[in-house]
Amino acid sequence: MFSERRVNFRFRSLAVAGAFVLALIGTALAAPAATAQPREVPAAAAGVIRANEEVAFNYFVGKGLTPIQAAGVVGNLDQESYMDPTIHQIGGGPGRGLAQWSAGGRWDTYPGDNLVEFANNAGVDRYGLQVQLDFIWYELTEFSYYGLAQLRAATTIEAAVIAFQDKFEGCGTCHTDRRIAYAQDAYNLYT
């Protein structure tokens, strides 16, 4: 009984410590104020964000999107996940990965339209950057309601951001100004 309590206490202590670390990480990566000022993140995280942004930007340009349209996608993904394909929604919500696909939905449940099945069929880790970019492209090209036509029609960064935000992301509180600022930043960096 005493050793069982000690084990439970250790698990509780680890859980509290883990929650504290996650809270610190969440605070460090918190989104900027609604004024869409450049984000302030730790230097190590910024390097990963930038590297993943550039890969994603070039991926979508390589698929035939214009640099403006690709930047619109990247700005949205920055807002959703800081370009971290391993991220789970802060606060324990259902969002997973780059586009914050919902567990119980597009992440792992919808027949023929879920990232877990897509990754398993490809024999790769669902948390990989490349498979998540491939899945975004799959959804855009296979399901018209995710807005590829609207995205391709966009000729401004704002229009590209809004097309992807409204059709693909379907966000609740979108923070469009942040998405536009991130997209403009990506466009300036990678063109």
Image (cartoon, rainbow, N blue to C red):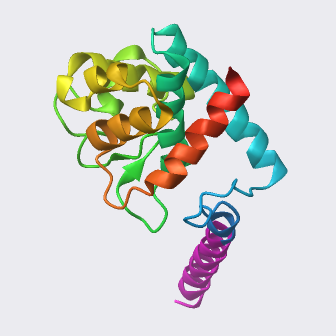
Quick one: which residue is furthest to the right in this view? 43
Point out the image quarter for the C terminus. top right
Quick one: which residue is furthest to the bottom in this view? 2
Which is more toward the observer, 146 or 132? Answer: 146
Q: Is residue 83 left or right of residue 107?
A: right
- Residue at 50%, 47% (x, y): give it: 179
Q: To which quarter of the image does residue 112 belong?
A: top left
Q: Total label count?
A: 0
Q: Secondary structure of the magenta portion, mostly?
A: helix
- Residue at 62%, 85% (x, y): give it: 6
Taking the image as drawn, is residue 175 in sight?
yes
Which is more toward the observer, 1 or 23? Answer: 23
Q: To which quarter of the image does residue 9 belong?
A: bottom right
Region in magenta: 1-23
**What is the x, y in percent for residue 82?**
59, 46
Taking the image as drawn, is residue 86 in sight?
no
**Vertical comparison of 9 with 94: above or below:** below
- Residue at 28%, 16% (x, y): give it: 141
**What is the x, y in percent for residue 186?**
64, 33
Q: Is residue 17 left or right of residue 117?
A: right
- Residue at 63%, 22% (x, y): give it: 55
Instruction: Find out whether residue 18 is within the magenta segment.
Output: yes
Instruction: Find out whether residue 13 is within the magenta segment.
Output: yes
